[in-house]
Image (cartoon, helix red, strand yellow):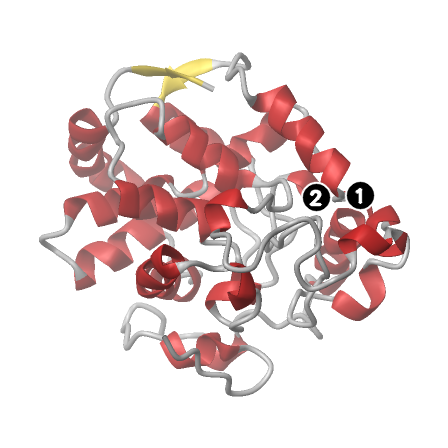
Amino acid sequence: MRVINIGPDPSLAYRPDLDINKTKEKDDYRNFESGSLIDRVFNTYKLMHTNQTLDFVKKKHSEWAGCNHKSMTMMDAVMSLDQMVDESDPDVDFPNSFHAFQTAEGIRQAHPDNEWFQLVGLIHDVGKAMALWGEQQWAVTGDTFPVGCKIQNSVVFRNNTFLDNPDEKNPKYNTEYGIYEPNCGLDKVLMSWGHDGTTRRYTNRCPFSWYTGLYMIRFHSFYPWHTSGDYMHLCNANDLRMLPWVQEFNKFDLYTKTTEMPEIDTLKLYYQSLIDKYCPGTLKW
C-alpha cells in the first residue's frame, strides 16, 4: 500500500471529480490556517488536544458503553443533528443533518448500486448526537488520533495545542509505539474520544453489521492515517486492506460539503427504506 503525500493535506490525492460543488474550489477544503471559522476551530482543537488523554478515553468508553442515554430510530438520530453545528469543521457552518444527506447523495451518485455504502454516508456522524446530550464538542467532533503513543506531526495543530496535555510529559506514551505492539492493528488502538467510535457502537447493536461499513465509520476521522500516511507502524494487514475503502468514503465525506442544501424531505423516503433494511426499529443510544 502506497500513501501519496503531496503538500500539507494529502487528501488532495483522493479528491473525486464531483460536479456537485460549483462555488468552492477543492483546494479550499480543510484550511486550518485562515478563514472566517478559524478561531472557533482552533479553540475546539486546543481543548481536545489538552484534555484527550489515555485515562480520559478509557473513562469515556466506560461512560458510554451502556447506551443508556436515549432510545430512538436511526432516522431520528440523523434528524436530531438539525440542532448540531460542528465547531471543529473549517468548511461549513450549517447543521450536521444536511451534511449527512450531502454525503449519502454523493455516494449514491457515484455508487448507485451500493446501497449499504450510501447508508454509511447518511449515518456516519450520528455519534455527534453526544453533543446534544451534554458532551463537549472537543470530545465529539474533529480529527481523531491514537492516545498512549507519540503524537505524529500530521495531527492538526500538532505544534501548539498539546502543550498542556499530561500525556505529553509521560515517557511511557512518548515513543512511536507507546503502549502498543508493532503492527498490532488499529482495532487494538485506543483512539481519541469522538463520534466515530460511538457511531460504530450504535450501528453494531443492530442488523447493520457488515464489517467494511463499520470500519469506515470507525476510522473516517482518522486523517493522520488515511490521508497523511502516519501511524502505519500500528497497522496490520487488515488495516491496509481497509484503507482504500476509508479513502473512498473520505471523498464524499469531505468534498460534498457545499452551500447548496439538499431537499431532505424528498430524500427521506429513499433513505428510510435503507434504514428499514439494515438498521430498523428503535435503537438504544
Does any portion of residue 107 appear in the rendered image? yes
Instruction: Looking at the picture, tell me which residue is in the foreground, 174 or 95.
Output: 174
At 53% from the left edge and 37% from the top edge, which residue is drawn? Answer: 128
Q: Which mark is residue 214?
A: none
Q: Nearer the viewer, mark 1 or mark 2?
A: 1
Does residue 165 appear left or right of residue 256 in this picture? right
Picture coordinates of residue 279, whole percent (x, y)? 25, 26
Instruction: Looking at the picture, tell me which residue is in the foreground, 218 or 129.
Output: 218
Q: Residue furthest left?
A: 113
- Which three-letter amino acid code belongs to the residue tagged 2? Trp
Instruction: Looking at the picture, tell me which residue is in the foreground, 103 or 188.
Output: 188
* Image height of 68 relative to 152, above or below: above
Mark 1 or mark 2: whose residue is earlier in sequence: 1
Whether the residues at callouts 1 and 2 have beta carbons within 8 Å, the answer is yes
- Which three-letter amino acid code belongs to the residue tagged 1? Asn
* Image height of 15 relative to 70, above or below: below
* Image height of 77 relative to 283, above or below: below
Q: Residue furthest front?
A: 181
At 88% from the left edge and 47% from the top edge, which residue is drawn? Answer: 166
Picture coordinates of residue 98, whole percent (x, y)? 41, 46
| Structural crowding at the residue carrying mark 2, measured as other residues with C-alpha within 10 Å and reported as few (<14), some (14–19) or many (≥20) | many
What separation in Å lies between label 1 and label 2 (alpha carbons)?
9 Å
Quick one: quadrant of the N terminus? bottom left
At 38% from the left edge and 24% from the top edge, which residue is drawn? Answer: 76
Instruction: Describe the element under mark 1 as helix, strand or loop.
Output: helix
Give the residue pinned by disc 1. 51
At 44% from the left edge and 83% from the top edge, which residue is drawn? Answer: 4
Q: Which mark is residue 138?
A: 2
Picture coordinates of residue 12, whole percent (x, y)? 45, 80
